[in-house]
Amino acid sequence: MARKTPRRPARQPSRSNRARVGPLRGRLSDVPALKVDELIANRDISIMVCCGSGGVGKTTTSASIALRAAEQGRRVVVLTIDPARRLAQSMGLSELDNDPKPVSGVDESNGGRLDAMMLDMKRTFDEVVESHASPEKSSQILANPFYQALSSSFAGTQEYMAMEKLGQLHAEALGSGRWDLIVVDTPPSRSALDFLDAPERLSSFLDGRLIRLLLAPARGPARFLSVGVSAVTSTISKVLGGQMLRDVQTFVAAFDTLFGGFRSRADKTYQILKDPQTAFLVVASPDADALREAAFFVERLAEDHMPLAGLVLNRVSPPVAQGLSAQTALAAAERLSEDDALTAALLRLHAERLDTIGRERSLRRRFAAAHPTVATVTIAALATDVHDLSSLRSVGALAAA
């Protein structure tokens, strides 16, 4: 096996960052504005990556920006990794798969177009094997039970294949000119950092000591190692079962020639993400966990010198009329008689909304104090779910307002 290159260590959220997001306060009026239309119009940007923790609206943000870019003249493909199929439904498609499909109903009068696709993790892995191994080797790998488990359920495979697919789309865009903008909706991971760390974890697994140990019998004539290797594999066989061990050894022996390709492609895609042609949009909602995760991601991007465009803050509570404080509203509700139950309920609802708005503003000020240079755009919470192109246009308009 080729000599290993130094690896980027997987980073965890720092305690210092956690502290900074806590008690500090900033002024929202000083936060620079994220100008989405200027970002879309910048032809030097060919990749936009929407990242953040799960449940903050990454898929909706990705789709709305992709649609707006297409209707302003960009040739766009949007890649979603969200298995809930919300993107397909909102774009009027019955389904999405691993091949880009044109989206109908898009205003193409400015010369743009929009294609959409959803990552098929196993199909992408299969394509990698088929394109980088001989027909005989690829058939052997694809039929191997261990490979089938690895390609469909191994932790981090989804994130790694998202990077693989991004690399494929980028190469096709450069080669054919089919698209001039790729919008990526990153996987709905527990942690936003998983998207950047997963390729490293999978590559480390494929290049780990156990894999090299399992390859040793097939590789070298070093007879003095055979006794030790046999003892170890005998122990593994007792734990895992003889058939599973044979499946793993068969897979590793067939897959050995692809190891270097996995590493080199991961490194190449990582460099593309660091290039100024890429713009990262960190997506969050105005709650403590999502903004803490966004802060971690902002810090990670800065450490890796990756191009951060800004923060998209989704589902922000819209302002309410001034004049009646929460305390006054609650006090008035308490004084009303049972005959005025509806008015009392409305007063309590008003107080709850004011409390929510105040809590959100406090969290936003804390984030602004910790990251005063991060450009931000807020998108008000909609009264209805986003389910079609019209509602996606509304989200895009709010982002660009």
Image (cartoon, rainbow, N blue to C red):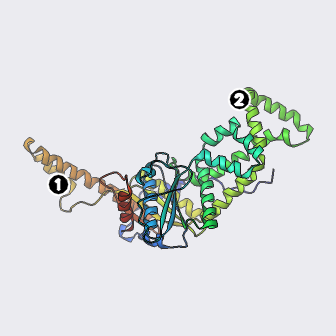
The x and y percentages for residue 391 are: 35, 57
User: Callout 2, which amino acid?
Assistant: Leu
**Quadrant assignment, res 142:** top right
Residue 254 in the image: above or below residue 236: below
User: Callout 1, which amino acid?
Assistant: Thr
Residue 358 in the image: above or below residue 253: below
The x and y percentages for residue 169 are: 60, 59
The x and y percentages for residue 294 are: 48, 57
**Quadrant assignment, res 224:** top right
What kind of element bears circle 1?
helix
134, 2: nearer the viewer: 134
Whole-Å distance between the Cαs marked 1 and 2?
67 Å
Q: Which mark is residue 240?
A: 2
In the picture, measured across the screen, residue 247 lies left or right of residue 276, that is: right
What kind of element bears circle 2?
helix
The x and y percentages for residue 36 are: 43, 68
Please state, as top left, top right, bottom left or bottom right, where the C terminus lies in the image.
bottom left
Q: Residues within 10 Å of mark 2 (few under 14, many from 20)?
A: few
Going from N to C along the chain, the mark reached first, 1 or 2, is 2
Q: Which mark is residue 328?
A: 1
In the picture, measured across the screen, residue 65 lies left or right of residue 275, that is: left
User: What residue is at 57 percent from the left and 69 percent from the top?
Assistant: 277
Disc number lying in front (1 or 2): 2
**Residue 21 seen in this snapshot:** no
Q: Residues within 10 Å of mark 1 (few under 14, many from 20)?
A: some
394, 76: nearer the viewer: 76
197, 146: nearer the viewer: 146
* Total tally of numbered discs in the picture: 2
